[in-house]
Image (cartoon, helix red, strand yellow):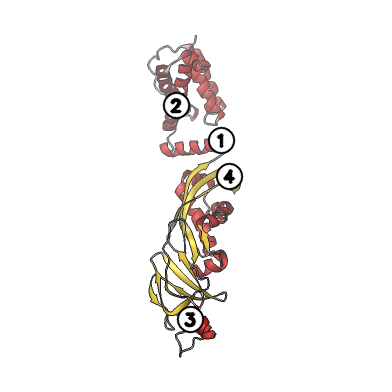
Amino acid sequence: MALMDFIKKQFIDIIQWTETGDGTLAWRFPMQDMEIQNGASLTVRESQVALFVNEGQVADVFGPGMYKLTTQTLPVLTYLKNWDKLFQSPFKSDVYFFSTRQQVDQKWGTPQPISIRDKDFGAVRLRAFGNYAYRVADAKKFHTEISGTRDIYSVQDLDGQLRGLVLQNISNAIAASGVPFLDLAANQNQFAQALANQLAPEFSKLGLQLDGMTVQNLSLPEELQKILDQKIGMGMVGNDMGKFMQYQTAQAIPKFAEGASQGGGVAGDAMGLGAGVALGQVLAQNLAQGLQGGQGAAPAAPAPAVAAVSPADVMATLEKLGELKAKGILTQEEFDAKKTELLKKLV
């Protein structure tokens, strides 16, 4: 009877896995009631790893290549099974294949704004999103920690866990970098590198290797975005206040032109785009002279007579000066001096 049972058994001669491109990370070879024949062929392709598990214990791990399964190629499993040397005994063991290729374009993001602590601004709320790439680097650890005995374990099964890791480590990444938040926000590559450095050890605990991390967008609160825009603007012109005033004026001209085309506001009622350009020139000259006078510089030689300025131009200039004063670029004294000078031109 035992001989008949043995004859009826089905033996496996070839063990291999061809990926289907569906994002599978781990796949268990279908055993059912079959047994692996001693001397069977095992094929592990590039970007794959094969893992033999006997009675819940990892026995052998095979990298890419073709193997003939004998006592020489399965030393650990041979020890566990104690094969009879007088007979080419078959054996039954769970065989798992793991994909070790990069899993690219994995999305991450903040569904809701998250709070981080910054040394310059205290608590800051931000939203961000990007993508990352990873691969299975340690099949044994991934099997014992994540995939286990499941027939198939896919990228989608792991997606939620990895997204949570990214969100959990954003604050720690910024703190560990020691870089002010505004510098990170202005340089998304630097932000992504800080985040990758923080996440790499966490991925390693799961048997994974983080191969890439990008930050595609970073949304700041409106008030903080204005500060960042000014910081970037100052970086473009350096410490030259005259150039900075030209930069501020150039930023304002489109707004004046838009107001003129729509007929809205004091400036829009009185001036078009051409007047806006003229206003920019007058404003830059007047502010440069005012700042030099406020710093105690020697009086400049009398300037040639300036063409008459319309009341609309004066009012628009005063509005712009008021904005600069509100932002702290002009002092109250400088604003009052320029206001007096401009009002005299209305007489």
The residue wearing badge 3 is 7
Q: Residue furthest bottom?
A: 86
The residue wearing badge 1 is 222
Secondary structure, mark 1, is helix
Residue type at the position of mark 2:
Thr
Residue type at the position of mark 4:
Pro
Label 3 or label 2, whichever lies nearer to me, is 3
Secondary structure, mark 4, is loop
Which badge, 4 or 1, is on the more N-terminal residue?
A: 4
Assess disc 4: are there few (<14), some (14-19) or many (≥20) residues with their C-alpha within 10 Å of its C-alpha. Answer: few
* Viewer-closest of 189 and 14: 14
Q: CA distance from mark 4 to mark 1?
A: 18 Å
The answer to whether the residues at label 2 and label 1 have Cβ atoms under 8 Å apart is: no
The residue wearing badge 2 is 249
The residue wearing badge 4 is 111
Residue type at the position of mark 3:
Ile
Which badge, 3 or 4, is on the more N-terminal residue?
A: 3
Q: CA distance from mark 3 to mark 4?
A: 60 Å
